[in-house]
Image: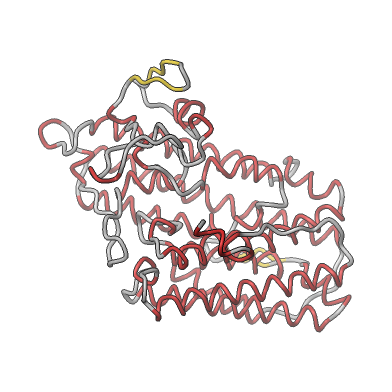
Amino acid sequence: MIRASTAAVALLIAGAAPAMAGKTEILTNYANIARAGYEDSLIKARELKGAVEALLADPSAETLATARSVWIESRVPYQQTEVYRFGNPIVDDWEGKVNAWPLDEGLIDYVQGGYGGATDQNPYAALNVIATPSFTLSGETIDATDITPSLLENQLHEADAVEANVATGYHAIEFLLWGQDLNGTDAGAGNRPWTDFSSGDDCTNGNCDRRGDYLTAATNLLVSDLEWMTAQWGDGGAARKAVHADEEAGIVAMLTGMGSLSYGEQAGERMKLGVMLNDPEEEHDCFSDNTHNSHFYDGLGIRNVYVGEYVRIDGRVVSGESLSSLVAEANPEVDAALRNDLNQTMVELGQIKAAAEAGFSYDMMLARGNKAGETLIMDAVNALVEQTRSIERAVATLGVEKVGFEGSDSLDNPDSVFQ
């Protein structure tokens, strides 16, 4: 599935010449792409639910490997939806439940002895709810005898208002499937044994039934969350209505999402910060060593919105009028430059992806003194920054007001990162 989606990039980059643009049609296509992306994410989440059920019914190396493979496939469509953040409040208010990171995994399950314990910043960093059926949270006794979606969503997630207490979403599931990645900046992902989901005397590391209950609850919650968001972009959905309610605000949402994901979020927080700190804990998909794909499909999502095309997981193409069309009408040179910069970003992210798939994993690229890895990452960072400048020129060309992009200390004030 990943190879098929990657191959589709060539089709997108080739692209047809922009058609004449109307804002209503552009926003309709924008909403159609969102609906398709979230629907594809839901399809893969349901496949993941089935794989988890198979793992827990018959734990083995094979059923664990299948669940891991489906999780990786599920990231392809979801990462392409991240461009809908920042400009759409309905997405921003929801997104933290499904893709928050980094997380203090000790909240959820056992961790290596040297991992650390409770701190003043996070007294629940080593709670290990899987091994703890009752605990005190903000002065209240919590009954965690039954690990349910409600417990995860309403009591554990961001417990005590600490963002690192991530109890739900893709990365909680990722941790349960892979376990901690203890390889540092050497090759290798997490290596949780399949026997962590076994029963009776075959169970390793204790509480295998509760670990399975947590994995089931988190996966079921992911499915229900994606069902809800898919509906918001469907006909009559709140997100679709919002972008059409004020066409100017809808165009602002599109540009804000593109620029903020491109600059502060991806170039800054997800990429340059890791290079500066040489820290594999800054990988987005750190347990699975899938960060190269997360970065790639984030970048592709930005491009999808601008050119107005999205390749679905079954190969169908959703397309229509686009921001590119609108910018090209006002200034063809600005449009051509932005399309070129978006293409160059995909080339650089593709280089990272290809290197990782050939054995030079993203955590290896982050190692101190690894010049080849730093070059790969920073070439992509620089391309993302440059395409953001072109997005800014597109904003000016359109005369759109109230567009502001998220920043990052790693880009805007790098000295503060070490203070």
Against 380, is 291 above or below? above
Against 213, is 373 above or below? below
Q: In the image, residue 187 lies at what x, y percent?
A: 28, 67
Q: In the image, residue 97 lies at what x, y percent?
A: 53, 40
How many marks overall?
Answer: 0
User: The N terminus is located in which quarter?
Assistant: bottom left
Q: Residue at x 36, y 76 (%)?
A: 369
Query: Viewed as shown, does residue 42 lie left or right of 178?
Result: right
Q: In the image, residue 402 lies at what x, y percent?
A: 83, 55
Q: Residue at x 24, y 49 (%)?
A: 192
The image quadrant that residue 207 belongs to is top left
Against 52, is 4 above or below? below
Q: Residue at x 48, y 26 (%)?
A: 155
The image quadrant that residue 373 belongs to is bottom left
Query: Viewed as shown, does residue 355 lie left or right of 249?
Result: left
Q: Work out whether residue 45 or residue 267 is closer to the camera in this orientation and state it.
A: 267
Q: Residue at x 62, y 55 (%)?
A: 36
Q: Work out whether residue 203 or residue 69 is closer to the camera in this orientation and state it.
A: 203
Q: In the image, residue 305 lies at what x, y percent?
A: 69, 64
Q: Work out whether residue 366 or residue 49 is closer to the camera in this orientation and state it.
A: 366
The image quadrant that residue 237 belongs to is top right
For the rendered model, the colour scheme is secondary structure
Query: Viewed as shown, does residue 187 lie left or right of 1?
Result: left
